[in-house]
Amino acid sequence: MVNVPEYISHVYKVEKQLKNYTVYSLVEVSGSKNLLTELIRIEAFREKSDTKVINFYLRLRNTSNWKKCSLVTGLRQIKNNDVFYGDCNIPQLIGNRSKSLLMFSDSKWRLKLYIYVFSDFYPFQKGFLHSIVNNIK
């Protein structure tokens, strides 16, 4: 059994769903510190960059125009799981000072989205990443 580092979980519910994106609103935060915004948007990756390993993007609602809101990370799927992960290298965007791990998991009927933020922690070994997934699901 692996020791899972501290994280803050955020629970979001679907507010609006269109073909290329879904908007979620915050329902619950574990602990007293919200590291994300009240509204977030998960956008489909439309191959406008060179990367080929992401399926979606996470965008925080920190301005009044979604196109100008902060693009935090691409979401990569963990093999054989309905779990995605990403990272945030932007200091202070999510309360971090260094690279931080974000994990994403849908509820069974895709009505809720769970985001786990491991501030200032990022595993560089895939095996450790899989161990974390298995211990927080």
Image (tube, rainbow, N blue to C red):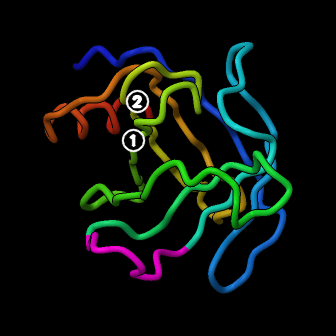
Q: Residue at x 24, y 33 (%)?
A: 131
Q: Position of residue 34 (x, y in %)?
A: 71, 25
- Range covered by the magenta-colored residues: 44-52
Horizontal side of 71 relative to 126 (left or right) equals right
Name the amino acid, label 2: Ser
Residue 106 can be seen, yes or no: yes
Image quadrant in which you'd find residue 58: bottom right
Q: Residue at x 24, y 60 (%)?
A: 79
Most extreme residue toward the bottom is 19
Foreground of the two, 111 or 46: 46
Tell me the SS state at disc 1. strand
Foreground of the two, 3 or 103: 103
Do residues under tags 2 and 1 come within 8 Å of each other at their CB atoms? yes
Which circle marks residue 101 in the picture? none
Look at the image and say whether residue 20 sits in the magenta stretch.
no
Residue highlighted by disc 1? 87
Foreground of the two, 3 or 65: 65
Q: Residue at x 34, y 57 (%)?
A: 81
Instruction: Give the main secondary structure of the magenta stretch.
Output: loop
Residue highlighted by disc 2? 100
Image quadrant in which you'd find residue 107: bottom right
